Amino acid sequence: MPLPRRQFLFSSLLAALGWSWGCRVDRPAAEKPPVPPPRSAEKYPEPIRSEPLPRSEFQERMDRAQGEMRHLGMVGLFVTPGTNLYYLSGISVGRSERLIALLLPSRGKPVVVCPLFEEERIRSQSVVEEVLTWQEHEAPFRLVQRAARRAGLAAGTIGVEPTTHYDTFLELRRHLAGYDFTDGNRVLQPLRMVKSEGELAYLRLAAQGTQRAIQKVWSTLVPGLRESDLAREISEEMRKIGGPGGGLVQFGPGSAIPHGAPGDRPLDRGQAVLIDVGMRVQGYTSDLTRTGAFKEASDELRRVFDLVLRAQRAGQQAARSGATCESVDAAARKVIQDGGYGPHFTHRLGHGLGLDGHEHPYLVRGNRLRLLPGMTVTIEPGIYLPGKFGIRIEDDFVIASEGALPLSELMEALPIL
């Protein structure tokens, strides 16, 4: 099938940057043309570089959140530290027992409440002008009451950021007794699912860096190498490339455990090598899985790999704007069921990704949410045969008017490493 223009351009960019497979590939007999010879993976181009999002984008996000609140009949949104706070305001701080919170009214200016010693850091990161501070000996939720008055919150319903600690919510409810409370995800989820061009640029860079790291370590495999050693090597390669990252490495029977942790299993000839990793660029994360075979592959391993690859292509073809999430899962799952391995595909087809490695939308049976342009998802079918091996192929895609466009370069055949 001809490559979509964006996929072709992205593939060309990877080639221009010196990205290479660094391994031999076995292509199914029916596929043409032949695989080009591998190029050296010994040298990297310059590390990935990126600029932070403009402050204006955070202001636009808060404006859209206010519009969503008004549409839902909410008077405000209470947000504590985490990816949702960063998404709205640009504030990136850890969550602790000391209250830091954004109170965003449906109309008017937002207010941040924070400890006095955090004020300078908060102001340097955020577009929020109104910052109310509290001393260590003071009760911070009394300041939340004041913030509600300053923000002009009328009596009504306040959305609470869904990962807020329960004890924080209890204090909020006690000090704002005249308000009702609801799930703030009703506001946040629709906004975060559809990515801006700036967000997509970070996700493309993250996918590119992840692939470069995988290819680098694939070229270094030797008998006896332990899963944990390879996992550390991948994290180090990602650091050199320009972002923090890491993930799962599983050999042989270990790869049959979908989310098994790297251990001390040594690499041996004929084993499956499964690497499920991601790296971050400006906080946005990729999530890719590559599976190959070390030195040689059994007929069964080759057959299962080809089936999983066909399932991923079916999922990609089904993932179009307007399609339901469950229909995409069903399209890929049918390929594996028809191939006789249905019971061994034990998880959903994929998930959204962005500031969180797993976020909405989820490609799973029962989810009737319709995909929209700008949504980003993984498509990651897998087959897991206990005691033998597991095969999973995972790539990152953006939903566009012309279909699901890969942010990463897709696999074409089983790599023999």
Image (tube, rainbow, N blue to C red):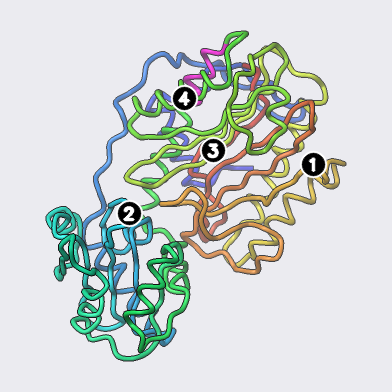
The residue drawn where x is 61% and y is 9% is 224
Q: Residues within 10 Å of mark 1 (few under 14, many from 20)?
A: some
Q: Which element carries disc 4, helix, strand or loop?
A: helix
N-term mark: 3 or 4: 4
Marks 4 and 2 in Cβ contact (< 8 Å): no
Segment tinted magenta in the rendering: 214-221
Tag shown at residue 96: 2
Label 1: which secondary element: helix
Q: Earlier in the sequence, mark 4 or mark 2?
A: 2
In the rendered image of this protein, does residue 127 appear above or below residue 149?
Answer: above
Q: In the structure shown, which secondary structural element does the residue marked by tag 2 occupy? A: loop
Question: Which residue, as the protein is rendered here, is positioned at the far top?
Answer: 223
Q: Which residue is mark 1?
A: 344
Residue 289 image point, x, y percent: 58, 35
Marks 2, 3: nearer the viewer: 2
Q: Residue type at mark 2: give it.
A: Ser
- Tell me residue 391's x, y (percent): 70, 33
Q: Which residue bears the numbered disc 3?
A: 288
- Of residues 403 and 143, the one nearer the viewer is 143
The residue at 31%/64% (across/down) is 88
Instruction: Say which mark, if any, is on residue 234.
Output: 4
